[in-house]
Amino acid sequence: MFKQLLSVLAVAAVCAPVAAPASDESAPETLLTAPGLRLPGSFIGTLPCADCEGISHHLDLWPDRTYHMRRTWLGGDEPLARDEIGRWFADPVDGTIILHGAAEMPLFWDIEGPDEVRMRDISGNRIESSLNYSLTRAEVFDPVELQNLFMSGTFRYMADAASFSECLSGRSYPVAMEGGYLALERAYLEADLPPAAPLYTTIEGGILERPSMEGPPRRHVVVARVGNTDPTGACVTPTVDIPLENTFWRIVSLGDATLTPQPDGQEPYLLLRQAEAEARFAATVGCNRFMGGYTLADDALTLGPAATTMMACPPPLDSYEQQLAEVLGAARSHLQDGATLTLLDGQGAVLGVLEAAYYQ
């Protein structure tokens, strides 16, 4: 399993997210994401260590599939800390998320519930032990300040404002004018680029909270040292084939209605799950869950009949749910264009539009 996932992640990790955020600022409300995690969230715990007192973890997960993490090896004269930034991917069949950052090996975590993840071993196998390998979600989302990072990305400078777009996560940050900033600005000016054009560079530094020109403090890239620069370079963004099955498809619209996730609610999604020769689907708009079998042959797709839970749904979820039931019953074919999935009825009319949200 590990070799297969590693080959997938090596390509997928450098892809831009479906809807990349402009910054790392978190939403005020949480969302129960399709994989089953309540995000954004800070997951905290100290896990076993073979040759130290324990490894303290602070793992910040965002719904856009980015993460920050600090691991601290406890004991010894001075604790050893390692920070990283990257992207996470969901495996619907295994019920796991996989962290892929600057480290050589991806990290596997079981989703134990909306507020808990449990570490797997480096090969992706579940750890059978009475020791605690779980991280639990803190009551307050408090992203860790990252230090001693080696980052690659694009630097832009215009009208005394500077920004850095980090390649692994796709996030963009303002750059603090301190530390090694002047060396980076000098390299940008020497490259003689058009105003606001990107300069690809590698840097050593951190992501730390600093005062903003307007509004409250926010996280900035703080440059400690500038590495290589390349005016013709760019973050690598190859095309990835997103599978129809075993992908969480976020429901964007049903008929004429555009779905809006409710604060602190369940994210609307459709999952076509193919495992052990069994084809089953699950879908929700954020209230009841629809489940059933499906048949797939080329472009033809039939869903149902569906069983469902029977909770009373508040508006607008009640109307969304009625439309979902109608779409599931009427779907006869589909069109997939990369990260966009369109469900069609028997006459080819559009029933709903979905986008790939979580995939390997």
Image (spheres, rainbow, N blue to C red):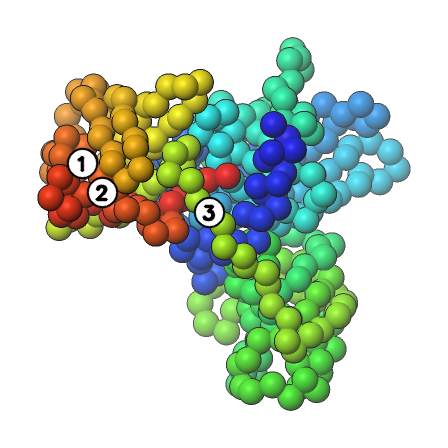
Instruction: Classify mark 2: residues with Cα within 10 Å, few (<14), some (14-19) or many (20+).
Output: many
- Residue located 15% across and 25% down the image: 312
Instruction: Classify mark 3: residues with Cα within 10 Å, few (<14), some (14-19) or many (20+).
Output: few
- Residue located 50% across and 25% down the image: 94
Asked if the residue at tag 3 contacts the one at tag 1, i.e. Cβ–Cβ closer than 8 Å, the answer is no
Evaluate whether residue 330 shows in this view: yes
**Dot label at residue 241:** 3
Q: Could you tell me residue 226's position as x and y percent?
A: 75, 70
Cα separation between marks 1 and 3:
23 Å
Left or right of 64 on screen, residue 7 = right
Asked if the residue at tag 2 contacts the one at tag 1, i.e. Cβ–Cβ closer than 8 Å, the answer is yes
Left or right of 1 on screen, residue 311 = left
Give the structural element (helix, strand or loop) at label 3.
loop
What amino acid type is highlighted by mark number 1? Ala
- Specify the quadrant of the image occupied by residue 192: bottom right
Evaluate whether residue 144 shows in this view: no
Cα separation between marks 1 and 2:
6 Å
Q: Could you tell me residue 132's position as x and y percent?
A: 64, 19
Left or right of 307 on screen, residue 281 = right
| Image quadrant occupied by the N terminus | top right
- Residue located 52% across and 34% down the image: 97
Instruction: Classify mark 1: residues with Cα within 10 Å, few (<14), some (14-19) or many (20+).
Output: many
What amino acid type is highlighted by mark number 3? Asp
Question: Above or below — where is 17 with respect to 140?
Answer: below
Question: Above or below — where is 25 with respect to 360?
Answer: below
Of mark 2 and mark 3, the one earlier in the sequence is: 3
Q: Could you tell me residue 88's position as x and y percent?
A: 53, 42
**Dot label at residue 331:** 1
**Dot label at residue 343:** 2
Give 64 or 7, whichever is nearer the viewer: 7
Q: Residue furthest top?
A: 130
